[in-house]
Image: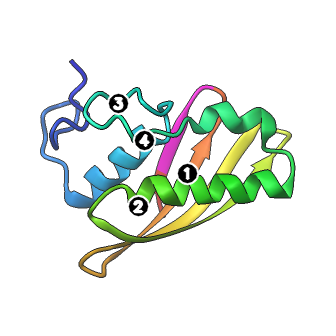
Amino acid sequence: MDVSTYPDLDITGRDLTEDESIVECLRRGLSQPPGTLSYSPSDGFDLRALLSRATDLRSLYVIDGAIEAQALRDERVAKASFTVAWEANGEVLRARGLLVKRDGAELRLTVEASKLTVTLLRS
């Protein structure tokens, strides 16, 4: 069983902090096609599926909006803002962003997506 976010435990059984849980939920949501998360069928946005189309400015605006929308699905997040860049040489999509939690605390994140993985790094 994958317990990386169910309900708030990491793979070793350690309790996740709220920030870690928010980051993990966003990573999971950005790694799954819509409708594949059984506990939340309306969530999901497969960032990896867009990599072949991330070559023009217009598609980057669509992607940053989709990342922001996915982040805002989490009731703990009040605001989300991301800026996306495409690195063609490494075929990596990188989005730098800011999440503002309901309590006003900020989380700075970098989302990196390749054809194989979606990684979130706290800045």
Identify the secondary structure beneath mark 3. loop
The amino acid on which the numbered mark 3 sits, given as a three-letter code, is Leu
Q: Residue at x 24, y 79 (%)?
A: 103
- The residue identified by callout 1 is 111
Q: Main secondary structure of the magenta part?
A: strand
Do we see residue 110 in this rendering? no
Q: Do the CB atoms of the residues marked 3 and 4 lie less than 8 Å apart? A: yes
- 27 or 75: nearer the eye? 75
The amino acid on which the numbered mark 2 sits, given as a three-letter code, is Leu
Q: CA distance from mark 4 to mark 1?
A: 12 Å
The amino acid on which the numbered mark 4 sits, given as a three-letter code, is Gly
- Which residues fall within the magenta stretch? 116-120
Measured as percent of width and height from the top left, residue 91 is found at 77, 36
Q: CA distance from mark 3 to mark 1?
A: 20 Å
Mark sitting on residue 72: 2
Q: Residue at x 17, y 31 (%)?
A: 12
